[in-house]
Image (tube, grey):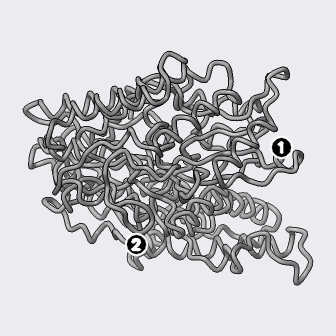
Amino acid sequence: MNAIEGHSFASQVSPQAKTDALDILSFLDDFSDEMEGLFDLVAPNPHLRMVVHLLDGHFSGKTITPTALIGASRVPYATANRKLKEMIETGLIEQRPRTKSGKSFSMHPSNQLLDQWMQVSGRMRRLAEAQFGGRSRGQRSKDYYFGGSYIAAQSIPPLSVLPEPLKVPGGIRVLVHGDPTFMVMDTLKRQFEQVIGTQISQRAFSIDRLREEALRNAERPTSRYDIIAVDLPWIGEFAEKNVLMPLDKVMDIARLDPADFHTAGWQAAHWGGRAYGVPAQTTPELLFYRRDLFAEAGLEPPATTDDLLKAARTLHNPRRGFHGIAWNAARGTALGHTVLMTMADFGQPVLNLPEFAGGFDARNLAFGAYRPTIDTEAGLRAAEFLRELLDFSPPDILSMSWYERVRPYAEGKIAMAYGYTLLAPYFELDESSPACGQTGYLPHPAGPAAHPVAPVGGYVMGIPANLPPERVPAAVEALTVFTSPEAQKLYVQNGSRTNPRYSVASDPDVRRASPIFEAVDAMSWRDELQFWPRPPVPEIVDIIRICGEEFHDMLRGITPPRDALRKAQARADALMGPNGTP
């Protein structure tokens, strides 16, 4: 996974610590050394030694050979070889051919071994906490939540290797966005290569360049990529322009367990009733706020736009270089997203969508005409709200975009920031950040007569429509692995703060990693996660750009709010033609 372009996230996504499983493996290895060195009567346990070495290699993405396992056993060769055969025969270890001749093998833990290991490692951790963790008997576990406990929740097992390695010339080629979640995939390259049995090459671009490259790739005779990442609003355009192939054409959708995905994220991957991608990261835009500063000022978490303005006004102190709030306000694409989401905060979609439970229905856009709805009374209230935010924002707010709005929040210079969950590593994984451990997560505060919404963002991974047929089966298998619950959990354990699946959000290890997962899960159950604020019609990229240009002139004081709304409406109407959809 090389050729990464755009923003660099190496410091944010490099692994912060070993997982619990690796910690316990290390402990067992060291403990065995101590016991064997203490008493001459304690002989090495070859089964345990080989299991520890094999699992460590699996979790670290290292190739393990039979010779390496025999060496790790600490017993004579003949004994070790016999013990190794026993473990293979009982189904604990699987062999994968490394060469075409089939004479050389790599060794991998079976699903049976992985399941048994996760069970015993969890019990060992709980035993250690009970004996040495400083809790008195009867004291509530620190892993208690929602009337239950993390211990009672089912833990997702580690990734297991495919039964057969993928056979595809040049390996699997992936095109992604250069954000923290996809950069986590890059850091885990070796482990994923072990799982799928072939090389992985990854290119990463900034958001606008990613779309350009995906469209350019669709014009080539054959695709350069096996899998591409697609921003949710592009789904309609990419389906209509034959950039992506519908997944039901090449796979059994049931394999993906659709019910496990957050509803809004799964629905947003569809166009015309067909799925064109698998959610790889569901990352709603939330309001990040400093719980400690709110408590000191006696402020409640803001539930409405008026509450937010009050909090921003109270905490804003520009003389000390401290500001109330940061948001996407740079001209064009960045501000355009803010405009659509702010209109949603006031109960107004950017298109004339039918009302539906939880908001508006954006599921059937492929089957009917639709019109822009920008110049409305709700649109005017959204515009006036954004002008008010300027008073409590940093002086360079009109040039702030995706990452610039969260950086000053992480540095302790901002009290609140609108931001996608994928940006949370900037402060959650930096112990020097004043926001680390002090951040609360809320859906967008709502305007009068509107409901709180957490606009869903993120990416799906899909298969290019011009991928040669002989490469499609391998692409399907790799896509299934990359978006599996096991992979999603691994991303979280290595720094990602996005997740598209309910099962992953309820995993005890994931819950411990960040409060963001519990917060987003609760928003999903309350139907606050919605994708209608950015309806995935083919024209949405241009509509976003238009709003970002006209509203930027308004925020600069060049255009009054009503004129900005009229201009944006007129340009969007011209874009779509006299009869709605072209």
In three-dimensional space, the C-alpha distance between marks 2 and 1, rounded to whole angstroms, equals 58 Å
Identified by mark 1, the residue type is Leu
* Residue 504: image location, x then y, percent: 51, 64
- The circle drawn on residue 88 is 2
* Residue 339: image location, x then y, percent: 47, 37
- Mark 2 lies on a secondary structure that is helix
Neighbour tally class for label 2: few under 14, some 14-19, many 20 plus, Cα within 10 Å: some
Q: Is residue 303 above or below residue 168?
A: below
Name the residue rendered at 58%, 62% in the picture: 52
Q: Is residue 186 visible?
A: no
* Residue 529: image location, x then y, percent: 48, 59
| Residue wearing tag 1 | 293
In the image, 274 versus 400, the foreground residue is: 400
State which quarter of the image contains the C terminus: top left
Name the residue rendered at 72%, 60% in the picture: 27
Quadrant position of residue 434: top right
In the image, 245 versus 29, the foreground residue is: 245
Please state if 554 lies on the left or on the right of 332 as rendered: right
* Residue 150: image location, x then y, percent: 67, 73
Quadrant position of residue 411: top right
N-terminal of the pair, mark 2 or mark 1, is 2
Q: Is residue 527 visible?
A: yes
Q: Is residue 390 above or below residue 225?
A: above
In the image, 467 versus 294, the foreground residue is: 294
- The circle drawn on residue 445 is none
Please state if 187 lies on the left or on the right of 327 as rendered: left
- Mark 1 lies on a secondary structure that is helix
